[in-house]
Image: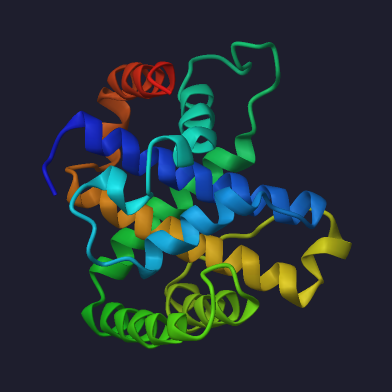
């Protein structure tokens, strides 16, 4: 993966897209199918040649690019006058931190990879969005990333959070967020780059959105 702002923007947008999916499930009990399938498919794809190919197309990352553009902006309001979602930023930073800790734990990382490989075999029988695939990825997250800590505490409507199917979707999306965070690191991203390149990342996200 080439280290450049373009790839870092794609990766960070993917992180925010997974976070947006988590928020959708936690607060409404539903999630956009295209958003969800795009995120989940990125975990199960291992033959993508570029960052964009990992997510199918830039259009599939429109939600993440938009969210990233707003969340990285200065001030407490988005360009259209809405209050920023500080929970989204907290989730995103939490995923970047957890991926770094996972990368420093080779045994746990290998366990995660093995779980993904086992789940890939299930694609012979189930579609990417099938509940069996979601449950499998959720279990991987629980058995690996969750044990590293600190856990990402998801806020939302308790009735939605208590639903087992929703809980699985949230964990699967968080795992996809870890995948995007890995892409961020592979593209040269780190906490320092996030601070000093914020303007460049915003500009790149805006450029991508204008090309859609």
| In-image side of 193 versus 63 (left or right) | left
Between 26 and 36, which is closer to the camera in this rendering?
36
In this view, the residue farthest toward the left is: 2
- Image colouring: rainbow
**Residue appearing at x 49%, y 42% in the figure:** 16
Is residue 177 something that shows in the picture?
Answer: yes
Residue 83, given in percent of the width and then of the height, sits at 69, 22
In this view, the residue farthest toward the right is: 159
Up/down of 138 relative to 82, above or below: below
Residue 68, given in percent of the width and then of the height, sits at 47, 31
**Residue appearing at x 53%, y 79% in the figure:** 142
Residue 40, given in percent of the width and then of the height, sits at 48, 63
Quadrant the C terminus occupies: top left
Residue 38, given in percent of the width and then of the height, sits at 48, 53
Up/down of 151 relative to 14, above or below: below
**Residue appearing at x 61%, y 17% in the figure:** 78
**Residue appearing at x 22%, y 64% in the figure:** 47
Up/down of 39 relative to 2, above or below: below
Is residue 192 something that shows in the picture?
Answer: no
| In-image side of 163 versus 129 (left or right) | right
| In-image side of 130 versus 59 (left or right) | right
Question: What is the total number of numbered labels drawn onto the structure image?
Answer: 0
């Amino acid at each position: 993966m080439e280290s450049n702002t373009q790839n870092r923007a794609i990766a960070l947008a993917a992180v925010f897209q997974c976070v947006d999916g988590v928020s959708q499930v936690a607060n409404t009990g539903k999630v956009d199918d295209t958003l969800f399938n795009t995120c989940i498919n990125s975990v199960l794809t291992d033959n993508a040649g570029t960052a964009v190919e990992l997510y199918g197309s830039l259009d599939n990352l429109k939600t993440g690019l938009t969210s990233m553009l707003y969340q990285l902006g200065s001030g407490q309001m988005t360009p259209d006058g809405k209050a920023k979602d500080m929970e989204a930023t907290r989730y995103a930073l939490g995923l970047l931190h957890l991926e770094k800790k996972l990368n420093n734990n080779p045994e746990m990382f290998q366990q995660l990879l093995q779980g993904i490989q086992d789940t890939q075999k299930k694609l012979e029988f189930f579609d990417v969005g099938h509940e069996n695939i979601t449950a499998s990825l959720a279990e991987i997250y629980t058995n690996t990333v969750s044990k590293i800590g600190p856990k990402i505490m998801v806020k939302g409507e308790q009735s939605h959070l208590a639903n087992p199917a929703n809980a699985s979707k949230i964990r699967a999306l968080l795992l996809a967020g870890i995948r995007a965070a890995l892409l961020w690191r592979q593209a040269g991203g780190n906490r320092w780059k996030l601070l000093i390149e914020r303007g460049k990342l915003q500009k790149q996200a805006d450029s991508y959105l204008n090309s859609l």
